[in-house]
Amino acid sequence: TQLGGHAHFLTPDKMQIAHGETAKDTAKVLSRFGHAIAIRACKFGEGNKYIKTVAENSRVPVINLQDDVYHPLQGLADLMTIIEKFGRDLKGLKVTISWAYAESHLKPLSVPQTQILLFTRFGMDVTLAHPEKFDLMPDIVRQAKENAEKFGGKLEIVHDMDEAFKDADVVIPKNWGGFFVSDDEREIIEETRKHKDWICDERRMSLAKKHAIYMHALPADRGREVVDSVIDGEHSVVYDEAENRLHTVKAVMALLMGGR
């Protein structure tokens, strides 16, 4: 609405999807009703495929609001936030992307996967930390390593949260589901509960550089992923980060729909 447009918010239960309509038919119908389609579809193994099918059959731009593989709009907001705090030359900046404990739901892999793909393209030194079994998708990790090599950055994977935080400029501790642990959600939760000590607290923040910033896509699981004194403290930039979601998505919409 800030750009003068109007949004129709549609949920599956209000659409023909609930009656079995295919992604192809949804795309062909909705693309006749507006100037773009924006979709969030996060079910593991299905979301990205669904959005791709819609895009292939739409006559208007399709914006990925988040799927099971990528979260491009969050990545753009994160990058904007880092640029605001550290400037445009980000080569050599140490960024820690760490798993953190939570069990509210099985959170998608898309946020950390987008971050390792995007940040390595800007020459950052990225450390990815997670317990054993909580891997990201192998193809994504491989592509991020290729990005790091091409653009002069690094991608290191460790299984120790303390080690990952040492001398970091940016820390982004956030939970993601253990989709490679098991196909059974109960088994994933059981494995998750073994790692309740993976929490961002003041001791861990003290391992990072004095000027380090704490980031999170929000909402954070307070008391599990992070303690209040960190997310509400001097290192936290989470509300700047949240605001930048607005600015970056407006830029994307103006680019894709401007003049249509």
Image (spheres, grey):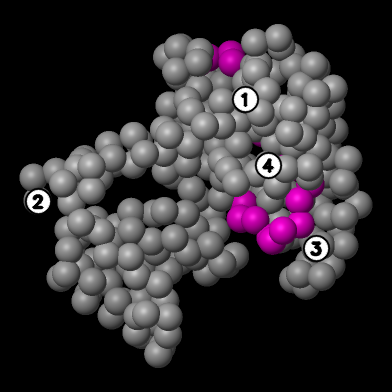
Q: Is residue 114 visible?
A: yes
Amino acid bearing label 3:
Ile
Sequence-first disc among 1 and 3: 3
Q: Report x, y in % for residue 126.
A: 64, 26
Query: Gap between marks 4 and 3, in whole Å?
Result: 16 Å
- Residue annotated with mark 2: 260
Q: Which mark is residue 174?
A: 4
Viewer-nearest residue: 74 or 247? 247
Amino acid, disc 1:
Ser
Instruction: Locate residue 114 relative to residue 256 in the image: left or right.
Output: right
Label 1 belongs to which residue? 236
Kind of residue at badge 4: Lys
Alpha carbons under labels 1 and 3: distance apart: 30 Å
Magenta span: chief secondary structure: loop
Q: Is residue 225 left or right of residue 46?
A: right
98 magenta-colored: yes
